[in-house]
Image: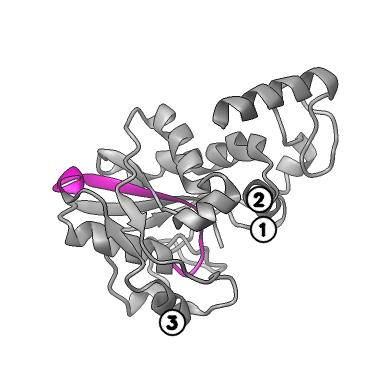
Amino acid sequence: MRILRRAGEALLSLFFPPHCASCSAETGAGEHLCPTCAEGVQRIEAPFCRRCSQPFEGDITGEFTCSNCGDREFHFDCAVARHLARDVVREFIHSFKYERQYHLRHQLAAWAAAGLDDERIRAQPFDALVPVPLHPARKREREFNQAEVIAELLARRAGVPVRNAIVRTRYTTTQTRLDRRERMENLRGAFRVRHPAAVLDRHLILVDDVFTTGSTVEECARVLRDAGAASVRALTVARG
């Protein structure tokens, strides 16, 4: 399927000039975001929560933890994202996931890759990237797992393997309209570790497209830590 997609993209580039996926302006070969639209991408800059990367608009010069994280215990050490899921970033994520614009994977991976240079990621070498899984039924419907596709491109940059260490055992309703408590209930018992020996004593990076309430990352991190993972951090394309 991936070979067919790549062949199709190559044929399209022969007959249609490359263009910005947001405004349709012409771009360079292999580029899907024009300079004008790129200027509208909202980067996450300090100050932001050290645990979940939520930006804070205020006069804070030191490290801080936001109110949503301050009273909670997590199984993941931190969730790193360098962009907000707003405007063109959100548009690209939705087009990739729901409209099968598979070529946008490169731009999404580039946004996620900015997090590889974050000090929270660089502070501890990691052994593998672990994509957040889709339920098999949803993967058949979508034809790909967006987290896995992004993880594979990140792995080339980071020089580490992708480990599909987690499986989704229960089909869950969409999380979009649920609050944090409802999301946690919705995901309870929805994941398990495929081969515990593969994650034992490993430092792992969970990969997903968007971190919103952290419910999905937390449940995945919980099963990984219960299986013996040494540490779990998360890296996403954007922060919701």
Give left or right: position of 121 versus 125.
right
Q: Decide: marks 1, 2 in contact (CB < 8 A)? A: yes
In this orientation, does residue 15 appear? Answer: yes
Expressed as whole percent of the image width and height from the top left, the position of residue 69 reads: 38, 73
Magenta stretch contains residue 209: yes
Give left or right: position of 233 versus 23.
left
Tell me the quadrant of the picture where the C terminus can be found.
Answer: bottom right
Give left or right: position of 104 versus 120.
right
Q: Distance between the residues labelled 2 and 3?
A: 26 Å
Give the numbered dot on residue 86.
Answer: 1
Residue type pointed to by label 2: Val
Q: SS of the residue at dot 2?
A: helix
In this orientation, does residue 120 appear? Answer: no
* Magenta stretch, residue numbers: 197-214
Residue assigned mark 2: 89
Residue assigned mark 3: 181
Residue type pointed to by label 1: Arg
